[in-house]
Each structure stands twice: as structure tokens, then as C-alpha cells.
Amino acid sequence: MQNLKVVCQHCFKINSLPVKDSYQKANCGHCKKSLLDTKPVELTSKNFDYYIANNDLPILVDYWAPWCGPCRMMAPTFEQVASTLPLKVLFAKVNTENEQLLASRFGISGIPTLILFKNGKEANRTSGALDAGSLKRFALS
């Protein structure tokens, strides 16, 4: 049986899970917290590369800032869509105000910008706030 590498968003330890269509329960082998927790994880320059490189699942990163109106409007939708895709797509956020080097590294010129990473590499990107349906389609693209 094939396994998935998934980084726990609580303790950042790498877990190996059997591939399934859906999961009733999946806990971190280290901190014991649920890997089904869908709250978007906050990424920083200290943990970004590690998180992106050590997850087999796609990762959707929302580049945002606290002063950005469209970012604040989309935040609840981002969390709501994340809650519908446990262990299908991992959702993460980068505060471009605090992480200017990460924003610069990925050429973020407007926010919100969403980048979908697959196999550790950028696979797709879009700028602007999305509604729930569009966000889910983008996450699964």
C-alpha cells in the first residue's frame, strides 16, 4: 500500500499515512493531534520550505495582509473551503506584511494571491478574492 507524507500543522513533524479516499481518524504520531484539522496553517520564512517540501498533498497558500480588504473578506471562505477538504488539499497562509522576503521570492505584486503547490513546486496561481466554488475548483485543479 502506498503512503502519503503529511506534515502535522501543530508540531511540524512528518507523518506517513496510508492512501485512502477518506479518513475517519488520522492523528499525528508525535503530538497526537488530529491531522484532519483543517484550520489553515501560518507559514513563515522559517517553516515554509520544510512544509512545502515534506507534504505529498497539494498545498494552497494564500498570500495576504491584515490591511487588505479583499483578503479579510476572503479569509472566512478560505477557512470554510479548507474544512471541506481534509487530507485532500492542505491550506496555508503567508502574511506578506510580516514575510516580505517570501512575498518577494514568489513575485507577489497584488493580494490576495493564491499559489497551489504540488510536489514541492508551484503548479498554479491566481490573484484576487475567490468565492467558495471558485476557490474549491482552484484548490482541486
Image (cartoon, rainbow, N blue to C red):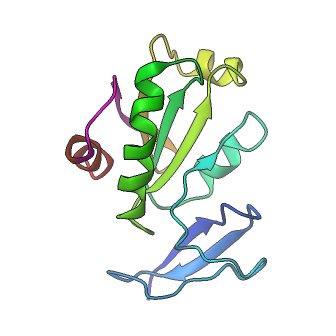
Q: Residue at x 20, y 47 (%)?
A: 133
Relative image position of residue 41 (x, y in whole percent):
61, 51
In this view of the protein, which residue sits in the foreground, 1 or 68? 68
Q: Position of residue 79 (x, y in %)?
A: 45, 51
What is the quadrant of residue 20 in the picture?
bottom left
> Is 134 contained in the magenta span?
no
Number of disc labels? 0
Looking at the rendering, the stretch of residues picked out in magenta corresponds to 123-132
Whole-percent x and y of residue 132? 26, 46
Residue lying at the far top of the rendered structure: 109
Q: Considering depth in this image, is 53 or 140 the residue closer to the camera?
A: 140
Residue at horizontal 52 percent and vertical 73 percent from the top = 36
Does residue 113 sit above or below 115 in this rendering?
Answer: above
x and y percentages locating residue 114 in the rendered image: 41, 32
Q: Quadrant of the N terminus?
A: bottom left
Which residue occupies 50% across, 18% down? 68
Q: 75 or 101: which is nearer to us?
A: 75
Left or right, 85 with respect to 42, comes to left
* Picture layout, residue 100 above or below residue 72: above
Tell me the residue at 46%/60% (across/down).
57
**Which of the 4 quarters of the picture holds residue 22?**
bottom left
Q: Is residue 26 left or right of residue 99?
A: left
Residue 21, compared with residue 109, is above or below; it is below
